[in-house]
Image (cartoon, rainbow, N blue to C red):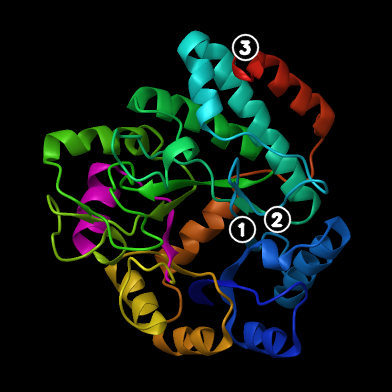
Amino acid sequence: MKPVIFGLAGETLGPDERAFFAEVEPAGYILFKRNIVDRGQLRALTDALRSLHGRDDLLIMIDQEGGRVARMQAPVWPSFPPAALFDRLYDIAPSSAIAAARANAQAIALTLAEVGITVDALPLLDVRQDGASDIMGDRTLGAEPMRVAALGRAMLEGLAAGGVVGIVKHMPGHGRALVDSHLDLPVVTANADALERDLAPFRTLRSAPMGMTAHVVYTQWDAARPASLSPTVIGEVIRERIGFDGLLMSDDLDMKALKGSIPDLAAGVVAAGCDLALNCFGRMDDMIGIAHALPDISERARARLDRAMASVTRGGDQPPLEQLLATRDQLLEPVAA
């Protein structure tokens, strides 16, 4: 097995992809709108991936946050609200906000599990900061670390109740970035005391099964390298100071924050301490290069992967999706206008 998550080119597995994936055996896959038509097509695609590897617990992930980040969209699937709505409700009714966030995440999980998706890149634990890039904005759960952690925990619990593994992101915190890391490399110059606010939600939820790094430079810890490529940030901050021992993946290697060839970047994030590299675009030349550049997955990374995928129970009795959506909407009513 190679320590990488690959994207797919289209709506079905092509013969070249099928042969390549069978030979290389990536740790998992990520799906985007280009891979999605409807329930039947999407279930057939995920079934084909599982059949290829003979694993029911195969890591098949998606970014289904709600709001502006939603790969599975209406009218085929329900629309889900942005995280900021739960933050607004927390201002007036914290327990209702937590219950609404949990119900919403479980509803998301049911829509994913139905089509064979096993992992969701949710929740964001990035603490919102005034003046920062809007790339986080309404995707965040708030500007107060304890609130972010409380709502993030509810989302992890809701996803798990629905049979889907959650990913906390973007470690060790993207909330201070002044530019969008999809377009450029953010450099955060905050001191150690200030950065404690960013670490706090991740420390509270350090037992989460999976985490994702940030393509952000933190000059306090490593002025030369973004977190995803920094052994210092991964080893001393994420693993030691936060205490996270779950499966750690990089953010997407194709983001413009990173410079260099995609295979070299994949090797770099794994060498820095990420368990898995994330390569989203599904370009065969890049994937072949990554397969050649990466070693086989380490025993520790494989154990973390297996532990994360075993952290939820799939296929159990679930409340109807409509019931979860109705519960969420009733709780959100005071801030929904």
Describe the element under mark 3 as helix, strand or loop: helix
From what the image shows, is residue 273 above or below residue 79? below
- Locate residue 142 relative to residue 327 in the image: left or right: left
User: What is the magenta range?
Assistant: 231-253
Membership of 3 in magenta stretch: no
Residue at 55 percent across and 74 percent down: it is 281
Name the residue tied to disc 1: 61
How far from the left and from the top, in percent, is residue 92? 50, 9
Say what amino acid the circle numbered 1 marks: Met
Q: Nearer the observer, disc 3 or disc 2?
A: 3
Query: What number is the disc on residue 307?
Result: none
Displayed quadrant of residue 155: top right
Name the residue tied to disc 3: 334
How far separated are the C-alphas under marks 1 and 3?
A: 33 Å
From what the image shows, is residue 295 above or below residue 95? below
Residue at 44 percent across and 71 percent down: it is 254
Circles 2 and 1 in contact, beta carbons < 8 Å: yes
Describe the element under mark 2 as helix, strand or loop: loop
Q: Earlier in the sequence, mark 2 or mark 1?
A: 1
Say what amino acid the circle numbered 2 marks: Ile
Name the residue tied to disc 2: 117
Q: Nearer the observer, disc 1 or disc 3?
A: 3
150, 244: nearer the viewer:
150
230, 188: nearer the viewer:
188
Q: Quadrant of the N terminus?
A: bottom right
How far separated are the C-alphas under marks 3 and 2?
A: 32 Å
Say what amino acid the circle numbered 3 marks: Pro
From what the image shows, is residue 178 above or below residue 280? above
How far separated are the C-alphas under marks 2 and 1?
A: 6 Å
